[in-house]
Amino acid sequence: MPVAPNACADTRNLPGPILAAAGIVAIALTLTTAGYGSLTWCALSALASVLCLRFGIGLMIIEHRRVKAAKRRDSARQDRI
């Protein structure tokens, strides 16, 4: 039976990578709209890409810190036993 890695089993860390991926897609959309010369759509997609990337990477950093703190607590608990 296959075993899912912790990244797939814990659903709390999924919004970060999803938002980061949406930010990358929005960057592609920004470049496409800039190529067609539509400045309004270019500005809107640039704003969306910046927001998605910023919040996506921020959520991934927060999740990484949460996992590190949980590991630190578990190792401290193991040391006491």
Image: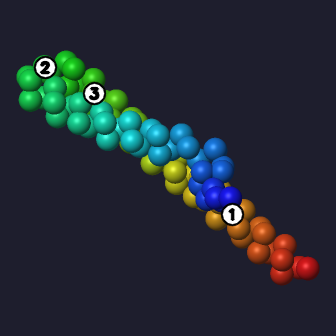
Judge whether 15 appears above or below 39 on screen.
below
* Quarter of image, res 35: top left
Q: Is residue 23 visible?
A: yes
Q: CA distance from mark 3 to mark 1?
A: 36 Å
- Residue 9 vertical position relative to residue 21 in the rendered view, above or below: below
Q: Which residue is mark 2?
A: 38
Q: Give the mark count.
A: 3
Quadrant of image for the N terminus:
bottom right
Packing grade of label 1 (10 A; few <14, some 14-19, many >=20) is few
Q: Residue at left 52%, top 51%?
A: 60
Label 2, residues with CA under 10 Å away: few <14, some 14-19, many ≥20: few
How far across and down, in percent of the image, does residue 5 sit? Answer: 61, 59
Q: CA distance from mark 3 to mark 2?
A: 11 Å
Q: Is residue 21 left or right of residue 17?
A: left
| Disc marking residue 29 | none
Alpha-carbon distance for marks 2 and 1? 46 Å
Q: Which residue is mark 1?
A: 69
- Left or right? Give the position of 71 relative to 5: right
Which of the marked residues, 3 or 2, is nearer the chain's N terminus? Answer: 2
Coloring applied to the structure: rainbow
Q: Quadrant of residue 38?
A: top left
List the single residue furthest toward the front: 1
- For label 3, the SS is helix
Q: Where residue 13 appears, x then y in whole percent?
A: 59, 47
Q: Which mark is residue 45?
A: 3
Question: At which x and y percent is residue 17?
Answer: 47, 45
The x, y position of residue 67, in whole percent, is 65, 60
Q: Earlier in the sequence, mark 3 or mark 1?
A: 3
Which comes sooner in the sequence, label 2 or label 1?
2
